[in-house]
Amino acid sequence: MDFSAADVTRVLDLAQAVKRNPGAYTTRLAGKSIAMIFAKQSTRTRVSFEVGIHQLGGQALSLSTSGGTGMQMGRGETVEDTAKVMSRFVHAIVIRTFGQDQIDGLAQYGSIPIINALTDMYHPCQALADLLTVREKLGTTAGKKLVYVGAANNVSNSLMLAGPRSGMDVVVACPDSLRPNPAVLERAQADAKAAGTQVGVDTDPMRAVKGADVIYTDTWVSMGEEEQAKALIAKLHGFTVNRAMMEATGRDALFMHCLPAHRGEEVEAEVMDGKWSVVFDEAENRLHAQKAVLLLLLGGESWS
Ligand code: CP
């Protein structure tokens, strides 16, 4: 939401430039230290940020909020005090946590860029990598239709917001009981109206995917929802992405997934590992998109 459509275009243009010629950017973050705070598990986000910072010549500090080596935040130090202290030491914070309020608080009280590496509400770095992947595979995001199939969550929230900023239509195909957060949907639909794109919700996945250029899904059980796993899986019967769904698009649609995947739940192995799937290129693009974000936020490149 902090990025305009022009900002998103700039991030994607730079991400493609960085991907094509990584050697041109190896000292752009020299002398810069970036704190990476992870309160939840991660493979892609953590590794791609740490490697990306290294490739740009910066220093990544890998931190957690729990355990004997965790930050005092995990013992109750306030977000306000943490933000003020960290702003004296590092040039940016990358944080994965539960509540969006934690990130908003760090941004409010700190004086450095705060990068959302996933909260319960949003996953914007994933969405930027997804847009980069669509652009690479389909030539453009403009005029394309992405259908997210499954339980509405932080990933679908960020995709709904990314759509209007990239000229892409986004439909969330989900059971009625697992619809998107109403406030996020309202904001995304207002943005879409202004941008001349569409953001919608459909409870019939086979109807929703007609004409789709991309079918996207995510795990049915997000981090922190493990106790509800059985109920969620029952509600999502009929929402598994399979061959019939890919063929119902009526075109050579892409299959995307932010990963980790659960074959046989949200996606059949035949699709996940089949001709439609671009999931590992999508995962790689986390690195390039995030390097672009870091360069722009930390002055290694200009926004214009
Ligand atoms: N897609 C994603 O965020 O992966 P990780 O949870 O492994 O970081």
Image (cartoon, helix red, strand yellow):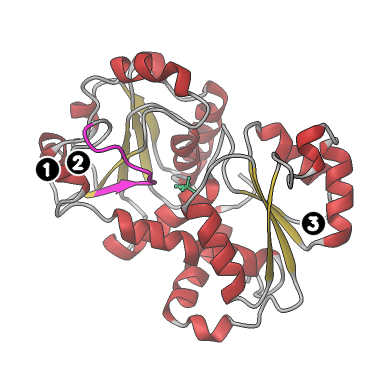
- How far apart are labels 3 and 2 at the CA level? 43 Å
Disc number at residue 98?
none
> On the rendered structure, is 208 left or right of 133?
left
Q: Secondary structure at mark 2?
A: loop
List the residue tagged with mark 1: 250
Q: Is residue 232 above or below residue 261?
A: above
In the image as oriented, which residue stretches furthest toward the bottom? 24
Q: Residues within 10 Å of mark 2 (few under 14, many from 20)?
A: some
> On the rendered structure, is 120 left or right of 75?
left
Q: Position of residue 113 (x, y in %)?
A: 74, 56
Q: Earlier in the sequence, mark 3 or mark 2?
A: 3
Label 2 is placed on what type of residue? Gly
Label 3 is placed on what type of residue? Ile
Taking the magenta stretch, the answer to whether it contains residue 261 is yes
Q: Position of residue 182 (x, y in %)?
A: 52, 21
Question: Closest to the observer: 216 or 102?
Answer: 102
Judge depth for marks 3 and 1 and give the one in front. 3
- How far apart are labels 2 and 1 at the CA level? 6 Å
Q: Residues within 10 Å of mark 3 (few under 14, many from 20)?
A: many
Taking the magenta stretch, the answer to whether it contains residue 211 is no
Q: Position of residue 101 (x, y in %)?
A: 71, 32
Q: Secondary structure at mark 1?
A: loop
Question: Closest to the observer: 158 or 65?
Answer: 65
- Image marks 2 and 1: residues in contact by CB distance under 8 Å: yes
Disc number at residue 211?
2
Label 1 is placed on what type of residue? Gly
Quarter of the figure with residue 291: bottom right
List the residue tagged with mark 3: 112
